[in-house]
Image (tube, rainbow, N blue to C red):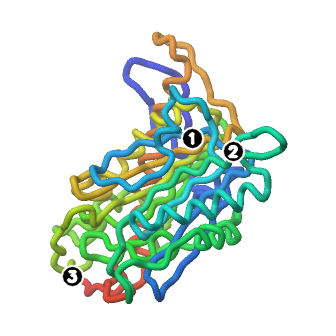
Amino acid sequence: MFTMGLGMDGPEEDAVSSIGPHNALTDVEGLLVGSYTDTQAVCGVTVVICPEGAVAGVDVRGSAPGTRETDLLAPLNLVEKAQAVVLAGGSVYGLAAADGVVRWLAERRWGFPLEKGYVAPIVPAAVLYDLGRGPVFIPPIDAEWGRQACQAAQNGPIATGSTGAGTGALSGGVKGGLGTASATLDAGLCVAALAAVNSGGSVINPASGRPWEIGLEREGEFGAQGRRAVKLPPAPDSGPARNTTIGLVATNATLTKAQAQKMAQMAHDGMARAIRPAHTMFDGDTVFCLATGKSPLPEAQGFFSASQAQAINQLGHAAADCLSRAIINALLSARSLAGMTAFCDLAER
């Protein structure tokens, strides 16, 4: 149950009651997700769109990030809502995909209102390093890829694995990918996560051959792959800025920018538990947060004056667990591509 009583001992019990209908980011009302995948170039783009805008926050913990518009999301800055977030491959070149998303949104008048009926779509973005994994070192990622991802956006199930921003991803020597997960809470709240996993660290515990956080599985979501224990290939040599896990957590709760930033910050705990090590000098680990404001945030009476603090604690805890599950889903649903061997093709122990 989602317990809103605030005691000195913290949350009384787990806030998560079940997974959402799609077990995906789109379980958060108001969000659309679309991807563009180029398997020949071994690269892709994933976009999260909120036509009505969503209060946004971000937390960057890796030391080699590739980002756009993250300063704008700081709580002290003017604009509160973003209309989309872009996750992309292509390293620094992949930031160009956000230009196509901006143009696509502007054509629909979705953005920060300007004079004469114009808008300025707010589109933060983060990229991962997948250069050199296709036939040419730099994939031909551009604004059109972002536009194609927008045209594919919908509010149903999300394709995962070797698709979108996870197309060229590699995680600790195993094929990485795109993953998602969701959780429903009491009081009509929903929390969900989306992750593109291209980590230097491993999602798999070498001692067991199973994901570090496999115990978070809910309702058999990982299927047959989640029951396998595999032999890991030798870990590749890490190199400067060649890794990065980028992701997004979302909720239908009404949050301030500061609360959204805190939720993104807490979600990083899920990344650090699911990927070991995480947040290294060679990763650009970045987590965004979107709050669509469809449901009020419960308040509680208690010792502290911040009446919503307990609700934020539980949302952040659920976001961390969802991000861990999304990361596992990314690896288990990936398919081998371009010489990168997926979990499903590894030999069992």
Q: Pointer 3 and pointer 2: residues touching (CB < 8 Å)?
A: no
Rendered-image quadrant of the N terminus:
top right
Callout 3 amino acid: Arg
Q: Nearer the viewer, residue 5 or 85?
A: 85
**Which of pointers 1 and 3 indicates the residue nearer the eye?**
1
- How far across and how far down the image is residue 292, in percent? 66, 42
Instruction: Looking at the image, tell me whether mark 1 or mark 3 is earlier in sequence order.
Output: 1
On residue 349, which mark appears? Answer: 3
| Count of picture labels | 3
- How far across and how far down the image is residue 27, in percent? 64, 55
On residue 56, which mark appears? Answer: 1
Q: Pointer 2 and pointer 1: residues touching (CB < 8 Å)?
A: no
In the rendered image, the residue lying farthest to the right is 116
User: Badge 1, how many Cα within 10 Å: few under 14, some, many 20+?
Assistant: many
| In this rendering, position of residue 244 left or right of residue 250 | left
Q: Residue at x 29, y 54 (%)?
A: 64
| In this rendering, position of residue 124 left or right of residue 105 | left
Q: Which residue is drawn at 70% across and 41% down?
A: 112
Callout 1 amino acid: Ala
Q: Where is 309 relative to 138, above or below?
A: above
Q: Where is 191 relative to 47, above or below?
A: above
Q: Is mark 3 on a helix, strand or loop?
A: loop
Q: Residue at x 61, y 56 (%)?
A: 20
| In this rendering, position of residue 143 left or right of residue 231 | right
- Quadrant position of residue 225: bottom left
**Which of pointers 3 and 2 indicates the residue nearer the eye?**
2
Instruction: Looking at the image, tell me whether mark 3 or mark 2 is earlier in sequence order.
Output: 2
Callout 2 amino acid: Gly
What residue sits right under mark 2 in the picture?
53
